[in-house]
Amino acid sequence: RVFLDFREIMDKDGEVATLCDRLGGNGCRSVDEELALQRLGRVHQPFSRLFGHELFNAFIEQIIKHGDGLQEEKTRKSLEENFAEFAEQSYAALDADDKTAAAVSSFATKLRATGKAMAHLPALHNELNTILNQENIDSVDRLVVLSHSHNYRLNGILWLAYIAVESLVEHLDGHDGMPEVFKQLRLDAPTTNILAQSGKSADDVNLDMHLLYIMMKHGETLYDFLHSKLEGSQPDLSVTSATTRAAKAGLALEMLSCEHIRAYTGVNQYEGVWYFSKEKFEQLNRWLFSMAYHNYFEMQDEAKQASSPAIQAIDAAIRESVQFYLLAVRSSSNAGYKLNGLTERLTKLAKQ
């Protein structure tokens, strides 16, 4: 080993001594980075507690699987308390106005929406049964990431991390977006540790981190067929399905240039031909669809207070989202792992 860049550090407040004790004689890649992580321990600790075995298991059993009502309320309160400390410490670390109360309210709304969305799946299956049968899909559960058809416990880690960061950033003035705030708070460190402790390999953890950045950067935008329709007191239902789908196909094309999406879907070149993983592309679309699906239930309270047409708009938007999801997956499947084949199909859809 070669040691370079020796320097003398004046340990005025004892943080270097604390780091030295914590390392226990072991080295580290960067003293500055370790000190930065140490200073953010007050943020990382309450964030990590959201994923403590008992609390996270309750989140899965009572909210995602929609368990007993009283226990569900108790679980939400425990999650909200831990989130409140995370939010308060985060705003302090960012030297921002303390919006903890507003952030907790948003977090609580997202938790309720998660439970409502999962509870609505049987009804959604009945509504979409004809469409699903045409695509040889036996259950609507296959379309969402927090279901028995997929590893909802492991997926729940990313889901809870996302809604925690989203709730925090929604009330942060003058920020540069969720990915930048995530980096500023160095939340990649605790998130990576949480994923690794779940038993995932280093490669899978790396892919999950790319996926989380995709979620933070793009959100539910690709599958949100509702947002613009609910602006104002009366929803605008005049946008035709074909026009909307064409716009979404164009957006999907733009998103393919995102470095995180290319990494997650395994874009690579071999003998002059660009390839991608259609399985990962389908999985990515399942996540993006799930985000929009859950977001619809976040807006339900506002819609109920507005008008019954707004509720009808939500139902119509869910159907549109499902149909676009099936269209995107079909385009991927027919591309035969060739990226050019996928872009050609999306370009054709965007021009319709």
Image: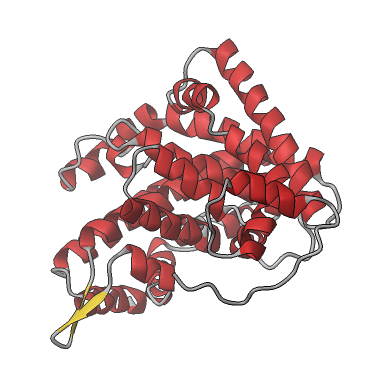
Q: Is residue 161 visible?
A: yes
Q: Does residue 320 appear anywhere in the picture?
A: no
Picture coordinates of residue 298 (x, y %)?
59, 40
Q: Is residue 148 left or right of residue 340?
A: right
Quick one: quadrant of the N terminus?
A: bottom left
Query: Which residue is located at x 42 percent, y 76 percent?
Result: 254
The outermost residue toward the bottom is: 272
Q: For this rendering, which residue is in front, 53 or 306? A: 53
The quarter holding residue 263 reads bottom left
The image shows residue 47 at horizontal and vertical percentages of: 62, 40
- Could you tell me how many numbered marks the image carries? 0
242 above or below 219?
below
- Coloration of the structure image: secondary structure
x, y percent for residue 13: 84, 52
Residue at 22% across, 64% down? 277
Q: Is residue 29 rendered to the left or right of residue 22?
A: left
**On the picture, is 211 further left or further right than 85?**
left
Which quarter shows the C terminus? bottom left
Horizontal and vertical percent for residue 155?
40, 41
Nearer to the camera, 101 or 37: 37
Residue 174: quadrant of the picture: bottom right
Q: Is residue 97 left or right of residue 336?
A: right
Q: Residue at x 43, y 44 (%)?
A: 195
- Residue placed most toward the observer, 261 or 29: 29
